[in-house]
Image (cartoon, grey):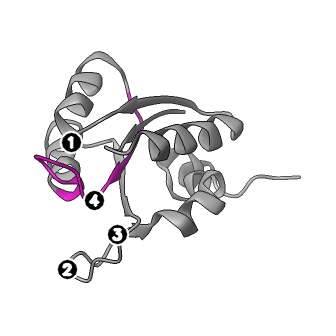
C-alpha cells in the first residue's frame, strides 16, 4: 500500500515512515498540507496519515480537501496533543504502537477481502 505521512515534525515523519515500512508499506512523506497536495498530484496514494496541528492548513482541513479531490483515499488524522474539539483524532503514541495492524483492519482492501485465513 502507498501511504503518505504528513507532519511538520521531522522526527514524527521519520518514525512513522520507518514503522509503516516495517509493515511492508511504501511510504512517502510531506512536511505540511500544501506539500502533501503536491505529492498527491504526482502519486496514487491509498492512505494519508496526517498530523492535526500544522502551520497553514490543519489535518482536518487537509483530509476534507483530499476527500473532495480523491474520494477513495482513506485519511487518518492523529495528534500528540489531546484535542477535545476534534472527536475523531487518534493519539500518535497509541497509534504508533500498532499502526500496521490498524491500517490492515481499517483500509478498504482489508475490509473487502475479510479476515485473513491461516
Q: Secondary structure at mark 4?
A: loop
Q: CA distance from mark 2 to mark 4?
A: 11 Å
Q: CA distance from mark 1 to mark 4?
A: 14 Å
Q: CA distance from mark 3 to mark 1?
A: 16 Å
Q: CA distance from mark 1 to mark 2?
A: 21 Å
Q: Secondary structure at mark 1?
A: helix
Q: In the picture shown, does residue 46 fall above or below 111?
A: above
Q: Secondary structure at mark 2?
A: loop
Q: Residues within 10 Å of mark 3 (few under 14, many from 20)?
A: many
Q: Nearer the viewer, mark 3 or mark 1?
A: 3
Q: CA distance from mark 3 to mark 2?
A: 9 Å
User: In the rendering, at what x and y percent does residue 58 appear?
Assistant: 18, 54
Q: Nearest the camera: 110 or 9? A: 9
Residue topped by disc 2 = 85
Q: Nearer the viewer, mark 1 or mark 2?
A: 2
Residue topped by disc 3 = 89
Residue bounds of the magenta highlight: 45-60
Q: Residue furthest left?
A: 56
Q: CA distance from mark 4 to mark 3?
A: 8 Å
Q: Residues within 10 Å of mark 4 (few under 14, many from 20)?
A: many
Residue at 48% over, 63% down: 92
Residue topped by disc 4 = 52
User: In the rendering, at what x and y percent does residue 12 appear?
Assistant: 47, 47
Amino acid at each position: 500500500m502507498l501511504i503518505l505521512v504528513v507532519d511538520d515534525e521531522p522526527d514524527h515523519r521519520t518514525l512513522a515512515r520507518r514503522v509503516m515500512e516495517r509493515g511492508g508499506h511504501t511510504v512517502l512523506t510531506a512536511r505540511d498540507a500544501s506539500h502533501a497536495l503536491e505529492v498527491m498530484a504526482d502519486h496514487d496514494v491509498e492512505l494519508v496519515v496526517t498530523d492535526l496541528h500544522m502551520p497553514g492548513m490543519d489535518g482536518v482541513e487537509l483530509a476534507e480537501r483530499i476527500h473532495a479531490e480523491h474520494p477513495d483515499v482513506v485519511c487518518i488524522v492523529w495528534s500528540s496533543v489531546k484535542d477535545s474539539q476534534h472527536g475523531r483524532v487518534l493519539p500518535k503514541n497509541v497509534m504508533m504502537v500498532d499502526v500496521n495492524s490498524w491500517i490492515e483492519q481499517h483500509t478498504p482492501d482489508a475490509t473487502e477481502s475479510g479476515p485473513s485465513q491461516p
